[in-house]
C-alpha cells in the first residue's frame, strides 16, 4: 500500500489542552485573585478562565474554602524554603523566613487574607515546621518553646502584611492625609511624611528575635 501523496509525510502533533491538577488550579486562582481581587473571585470564573467547564474545578476541590487552602499552599511554595540559610544560626534562618514571607504576601495583597485565615498543612509546610523546631532544639530550646517562638514570628509577619495590604488597597480608593499647609498637619502627620508605610517591619522583627535570644539564655 502506497502513501497518499496528498498528505504530508509527518502530521503535526494535535493540539492539547492543559491537564488540570490541584496545583495548577490553585496557582490559576491566585492569578485571578491578584488581577481582580478576592471579592470578584468565584469557582465558576476560575473554571472559565482555565478553558474548562466552569464546574470542572469541583472535581479537584470540594468547595471554595478547600480551593483557598490550595491558594495558601501555593503562596507558601513561593517562599522557596529549600534555599533558606538552614546551615546558619537559627536567628538568621528565622529572619530570612519572615522577610521572604512578608515580601511574598505583599506581592499578592488581595490574597493576604486567604493566607491569614487558614493554617497551611501541605507536606512542604509541615516539613519546614519540623526542620525549624529541630534547628531551635539543637540550640537548646525545648520543642514547645520553639513552637511558641515560631508561632509568634508567623503571627507578627502575617499581621504586618495584612495591615499593610489593607492600607495600600484602601489608599487606592481614598486618601485623607493632610497637606503640610493644612491646620490639621500635626506632629503625627509630619512623622508619617518622614517614614514609609512598611519600613518598621525589620525593627519589630529584630526586637522580637533579640527578646527570644535573651529568654533562651
Image (cartoon, rainbow, N blue to C red):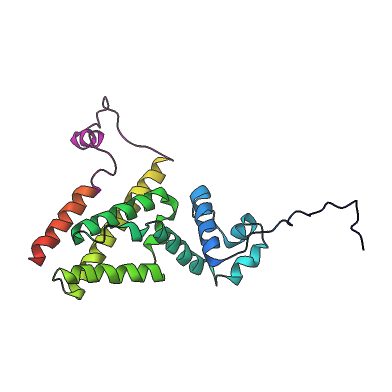
Residue 5: x percent and y percent?
90, 52
Q: Which part of the image, by quadrant, shows the C terminus?
A: bottom left
Q: How many labels does the image show?
A: 0
Between 181 and 57, which is closer to the camera in this rendering?
Answer: 57
Side of 68 where 2 appears, left or right? right
Residue 73: x percent and y percent?
43, 64
Side of 179 where 1 appears, left or right? right
Q: Which part of the image, by quadrant, shows the N terminus?
A: bottom right
Between 122 and 200, which is closer to the camera in this rendering?
Answer: 122
Please identify the quarter of the rendering in which residue 51 is found: bottom right
Residue farthest to the left, as pictured? 217
Query: What residue is rendered at 62% in x and 63% in y?
Result: 19
Residue farthest to the top, as pictured? 181
Q: Is residue 120 in view from this perspective?
A: no
Residue 75: x percent and y percent?
42, 58
Residue farthest to the front, as pictured? 1
Asked whether residue 125 is drawn in magenta, I would say: no
Asked whether residue 184 is drawn in magenta, I would say: yes
Compared with residue 65, is residue 165 higher up or lower down, i.e. above or below? above
Query: What residue is rendered at 83% in x and 51% in y?
Result: 8
Side of 20 where 215 appears, left or right? left
Range shown magenta: 174-201
Residue 177: x percent and y percent?
31, 35
Main secondary-structure element of the magenta-colored stretch: loop
Amino acid at each position: 500500500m502506497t502513501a497518499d501523496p496528498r498528505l504530508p509525510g509527518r502530521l503535526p502533533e494535535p493540539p492539547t489542552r492543559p491537564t488540570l491538577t490541584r496545583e495548577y488550579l490553585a496557582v490559576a486562582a491566585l492569578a485571578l485573585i491578584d488581577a481582580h481581587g478576592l471579592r470578584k473571585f468565584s469557582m465558576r470564573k476560575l473554571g472559565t478562565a482555565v478553558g474548562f467547564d466552569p464546574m470542572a474545578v469541583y472535581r479537584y476541590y470540594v468547595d471554595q474554602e478547600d480551593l483557598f487552602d490550595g491558594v495558601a499552599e501555593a503562596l507558601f511554595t513561593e517562599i522557596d524554603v529549600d534555599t533558606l540559610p538552614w546551615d546558619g544560626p537559627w536567628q538568621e534562618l528565622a529572619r530570612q523566613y519572615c522577610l521572604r514571607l512578608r515580601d511574598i504576601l505583599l506581592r499578592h495583597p488581595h490574597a493576604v487574607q486567604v493566607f491569614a485565615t487558614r493554617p497551611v498543612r501541605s507536606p512542604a509546610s509541615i516539613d519546614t515546621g519540623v526542620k525549624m523546631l529541630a534547628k531551635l532544639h539543637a540550640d537548646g530550646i525545648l520543642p514547645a518553646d520553639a513552637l511558641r517562638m515560631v508561632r509568634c514570628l508567623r503571627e507578627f509577619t502575617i499581621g504586618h502584611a495584612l495591615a499593610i495590604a489593607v492600607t495600600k488597597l484602601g489608599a487606592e480608593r481614598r486618601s485623607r492625609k493632610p497637606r503640610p499647609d493644612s491646620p490639621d498637619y500635626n506632629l503625627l502627620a509630619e512623622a508619617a511624611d518622614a517614614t514609609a508605610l512598611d519600613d518598621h517591619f525589620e525593627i519589630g522583627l529584630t526586637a522580637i528575635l533579640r527578646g527570644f535570644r535573651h529568654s533562651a539564655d
